[in-house]
Image: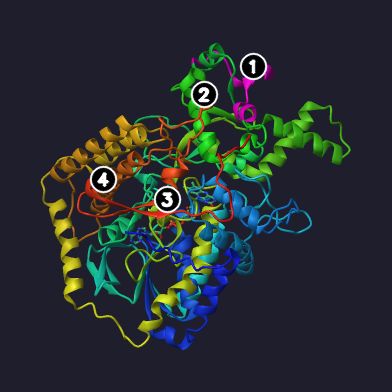
Amino acid sequence: MALDSKIPSGPISDKWTSYKDHINLVNPANKRNLDIIVVGTGLAGGSAAATLAELGYNVKAFCFQDSPRRAHSIAAQGGINAAKNYQGDGDSTFRLFYDTVKGGDYRAREANVHRLAEVSVSIIDQCVAQGVPFAREYGGLLDNRSFGGTLVSRTFYAKGQTGQQLLLGAYSAMNRQIGRGKIKMHNRHEMLDLVIVDGKARGIIARDLVSGKIERHSAHAVVIASGGYGNVFFLSTNAMGSNVTAAWKIHKRGAFFANPCYTQIHPTCIPVSGDHQAKLTLMSESLRNDGRIWVPAKLEDAKAIREGKLKPTQIAEGDRDYYLERRYPAFGNLVPRDIASRAAKERCDAGFGVNKTGEAVYLDFAAAILRYGADQARLKHLDENDTALVIKLGTEVVANKYGNLFQMYEKIVDENPYSTPMMIYPAVHYTMGGTWVDYNLQTTIPGCFSIGESNFSDHGANRLGASALMQGLADGYFVLPYTIGDYLAPDIKLGTISTDSPEFEAAEKNVITQINQLMNNGGTKPADYFHKKLGKIMWDKVGMARNEAGLLEAQAEIAQIRADFYKEVKIPGTADSFNPELAKALRVADFLELGELFAKDALHRNESCGGHFREEYQTPEGEAQRDDENFAYVAAWEYKGNPSDAVLHKEELKFENVKLVQRSYK
Ligand SMILES: Cc1cc2nc3c(=O)[nH]c(=O)nc-3n(C[C@H](O)[C@H](O)[C@H](O)COP(=O)(O)OP(=O)(O)OC[C@H]3O[C@@H](n4cnc5c(N)ncnc54)[C@H](O)[C@@H]3O)c2cc1C
């Protein structure tokens, strides 16, 4: 089946405005007759819910946490991009568009990315108007910093808490609408199925996580904003609760799942410390603005460090390998994440890793502290040859920029990162894949939309730093609230959708059957046991580097774990009460299906691009080797029962405004 991405014809910059004009035809009074369910109230869902309610729709919003403020979005540290060109460094809408398409290794839909770049500037204005406390320069203007894959400073930030501040903005806007009665908020509710009536999404089945009650909720359209599925790897930087269930349930009802194998492995995370860990911690990419990444140049030094006989500060400058600066002189430490991650792996695999397991590299601020300190000494007319003073002044500057991140590192690792380099290693962080959507953000199920990290998004095979918040808020504040009207316009006289229908009954039964099966199977092992096993296979065989043999093994092994799970999982307690183990098991069940499709997708894509690195397809320098002739498409999978039976549909990617070339950051 050829996928219709519904991209309007004409020059790229007209495409977006033509949609806005169309939407303006919808009488605002009619929106009061229309109900919209929004599943997820993170940055994407929260901003969408608030805006839809502001426009006049009746919104029913759902989240599994006890408050929208606890969505995973709160964890976003580094910042949000916008092509404002406040630094006068030559930024523009086109440049942001171009950087994003190139950063994604030419596997994103051009028109979507251009729209994203266009609305990026409005997001900042919107958030400033809400009172989001973005960092400012001394004179009061909004400050910017740089993120990977760009040569301009376009990232707006609020210390290391950008996601939290943006989420509070969206949450405040939502709360206003909750107060007005335009949003009905359902906290601690988990969507467990989608209800389709006459071919259209008309509601959901949700479980009240506190009482265990199964509920029916109807609407004229359903918006999924349920975040990413990085936790399929068990260990990731995602919040512990992040899961694929909502996206997977709509997939099982007919929504195609696109590019599931495109995963972002973030280069700057605190390395794994042991078998009993359940979570990995990100050290924001913003640290790469000032931190220099290195390993010892000599194998014997790396070995001595691993054995505790040498300290990093004892390695002379000439004996260090600043491998990113060496390999990519133009972008240096600010190469995109996929490239930085692979380069770290390459050095560690070659024996230069610096922690006990040999899977860590250094992120070092000593040079930045000296540079900033000398600057400050000069500004304050102090002695710039006084090293102790320079270090003190430089430390203050670094603390002002990244203080909370340094504090977090020290609390976890128990080492002072101002005086000794941090140790970092790549970890699973973000999923570029997700539900396939057309230009209007509608899935292949009419009336079912998907926004934020849960859709297959605008990032192609690799997302640039600070672009997820931009995409989530673009979708939520500026795209979906307008495009959804296009779909809803014919429904204004339809009236409330009844939940008393065979379709609701069947979907509800489906959920209850699965819960009963899990509760009553008499197994002995907790859900985490299976999740960990899945995660290990995903990391070892479907992780940073993949090959055909490993992917084939992974598919078979995951199918086996899934079969074992249904036989052996044990869920204590009852289904009609607060039961976090049951909630977890339901999510793990979906991860166990997604994982197999993930491996199947990675296996079929016989090329390397962005975060998808197939060992068989690399350049002599070890860079990703794309195959544009055969793989310049979005792989959208249709559910057919078992993940192994999923059917592939292709959306060809046409590039009219950028030229396809081998990515280079040298
Ligand atoms: C540590 C970390 C730091 C990051 N830093 C940055 C950064 O600096 N800049 C940047 O651009 N990006 C960053 N990202 C990425 C970014 O945070 C996410 O991509 C983004 O916040 C996702 O927003 P979202 O609204 O799509 O999903 P989320 O914030 O994950 O929200 C998902 C929502 O869906 C709800 N939900 C899910 N499933 C169900 C269900 N079945 N039923 C009911 N509700 C459900 C949840 O309750 C929640 O409300 C970072 C990511 C991590 C992990």
Q: Earlier in the sequence, mark 2 or mark 1?
A: 1
Task: Give the foreground label among 1 and 3.
Answer: 3
Q: Residues within 10 Å of mark 1 (few under 14, many from 20)?
A: few
Task: Give the quadrant of the C terminus.
Answer: top right
The residue pinned by badge 3 equals 633
Question: Which quarter is ligand 1 in?
Answer: bottom left
Residue type at mark 2: give it. Arg
Q: Residues within 10 Å of mark 4 (few under 14, many from 20)?
A: many
The residue pinned by badge 4 equals 592
Q: Residues within 10 Å of mark 3 (few under 14, many from 20)?
A: many
Q: Decide: marks 2, 1 in contact (CB < 8 A)? A: no
Q: Earlier in the sequence, mark 1 or mark 3?
A: 1
Q: Is residue 53 found left or right of 376 in the rendered image?
A: left
The answer as to whether callout 4 falls within 8 Å of ligand 1 is no
Image vertical order of residue 617 relative to residue 99, above or below: above
The residue pinned by badge 2 equals 347
